[in-house]
Image: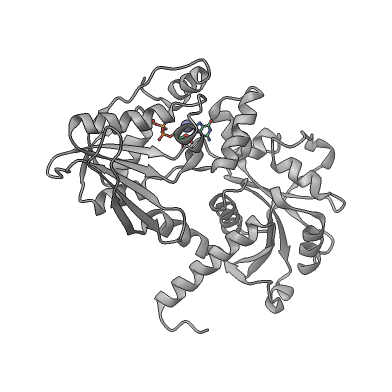
Amino acid sequence: MTFADPFAQTVSSQANVARALSELRRGGAIAISAGAETAIAIAAELIEEPGFAWALSAAEAGAGTGARLLMTAERAARLSLGAPAGIERFRLLSLPAAVSADVIRQLADPTAEPIDPAFLDLKASDDVPAVLCQAVIELAKAARLLPAAVVVPMPRAKAETFVAEPFRLAAGDVIAYRRSAASGLKRVGSAHVPLSGAVETEIIAFRPMDGGKEHLAIVIGKLDTTRPVLTRLHSECFTGDLLGSLRCDCGDQLRGAIDEIAKQGSGVLLYLAQEGRGIGLVNKLRAYQLQDAGADTLEANLQLGFGADERVYQPAAEMLRQLDISAVRLLTNNPDKVKGLAQCGVAVAERVPHVFPANDHNERYLSTKAVRFGHMF
Ligand SMILES: Nc1nc2c(ncn2[C@@H]2O[C@H](COP(=O)(O)OP(=O)(O)OP(=O)(O)O)[C@@H](O)[C@H]2O)c(=O)[nH]1
Ligand SMILES: [Zn+2]
C-alpha cells in the first residue's frame, strides 16, 4: 500500500500501533524504529524463553549488543537501579547473556518473587534512542501491562534488511496514537435509561479514535448549559462501583453523585474508562497486593513502575465540549481534577465537596489521598 495522502498514513500508522498493542499483550515481539535505529521489544511481564531467544537471534545480537531491560525511573529506583541524578524518566539496563526469562519477570513485577538485582551486575546502557524507549513504555502502559520491556537493539545493517514479523512500527506513531486516544472522541450511541432516584437520565457513549473502551456521559435532567453545570468526573472502579468493595470510596461516590445531581435538578456524570487511576484493573489488583504488604496507594503505583496517577483529562474535556458545557461546578475532593480540567479549557466555577464516611477498610486509603495527593476532606 502506498500513502498518497496524510489521512491514509495516519490511519495506517494507528493500525500499526493497535496491532503492536495486541502483539505485546499476547507476549509477542514488535520491531520499533526511531530514525535509523531499530529494536525488538517484548513486554517484560510476558517474556518466556522461546520469545526471548527469538528476539536475540532476530536482532542478531552479538557480544555487547544483547538484550536490554527497559523500565521506568520509578521501578528502577525501587530496585536501587536508579540513575545517580534520578531525573530520567526510564532506565535501560544491559542484561547478562545467561539471564533467564523468570529473572526478567521478577525484575519487572514487584508482586513476583522478590529478587536482589545486585548479583546480576546490571549496567546502564544508552544504545537505544530515548524516543524509542519512551514509545515502548507508552505502548506497555496503553496495553495496560507493567511498564517494562525487554529491548534488543538491532545492528543497522540487519535492520535495513529485516522484515519484521508481523510489521515494523515507528516510535513517533505511538505518541500520535496516544494523543488521538485522549482527544478524538466520537458519539456512538445513546439511550434513555431511568435510574433509581434519577428517572430522567440519558446515557451517551463516546468512543475514542483508537477503538479503545468507550467513556460514558450520564446526563441527568435537562441541562442548562448557559450556567455552570453540576458535573462529576468519575474514574471507573470495577471493584468499588460494581462489587461494592470497601477498599475505596468509589461506590458511595458514584451513587452519591447521581443522587446529588438528581436532587439539584440536573447535571452530568462522566464515567471515564480510567480504571485504577489509569493503570487498569489487573495492575490495580497488583497495587492492592502491595498495599496488603505495607505500601500505601501512591507508593504501590510507583513500585509497579507507574506514576502516582496516570489519568489524563482531555477525554472528559472533549465530552463536555461535545455536550456544549463550557463551565462546571465540579463534584470532587481532588485538586488535580480541578487543575486538569481547567488546563483542558473547561472553566471550573466551583468545587463542590464530595465526601463520604470512611469504613474500617478504606480509612488508610482515604488518609493517604488527603496527605499525599492533597485531597480536600
Ligand atoms: N492505582 C490504584 N487505583 C485505585 C486504588 N483505589 C482506587 N483506585 C482507583 O482510583 C480511581 C478513583 O477515582 P475517582 O473517585 O474518580 O477520583 P479521586 O481521585 O478519588 O477523586 P474524587 O473526585 O475526589 O473522588 C478509580 O479509577 C479507582 O479504580 C488503588 O489503591 N490504586
Ligand atoms: Zn474504587
Q: Is residue 24 visible?
A: yes
Q: With 130 as the anchor, is 178 left or right in this view? A: left
Farthest left residue in view: 226
Please identify the quadrant where the C terminus is shown: top left
Farthest right residue in view: 98
Q: Is residue 35 visible?
A: no
Q: Nearer the viewer, residue 376 or 128?
A: 376
For the point 85% across and 53% down, the residue is 97
Quadrant in which residue 25 is drawn: bottom right
Label total for image: 0
For the point 32% across and 25% down, the residue is 354
Q: Nearer the viewer, residue 254 or 242?
A: 242
Q: Nearer the viewer, residue 326 or 189?
A: 189
Q: With 149 as the anchor, is 3 left or right in this view? A: left
Residue 323: percent from the left, percent from the top?
A: 23, 51
Quadrant in which residue 171 is drawn: bottom right
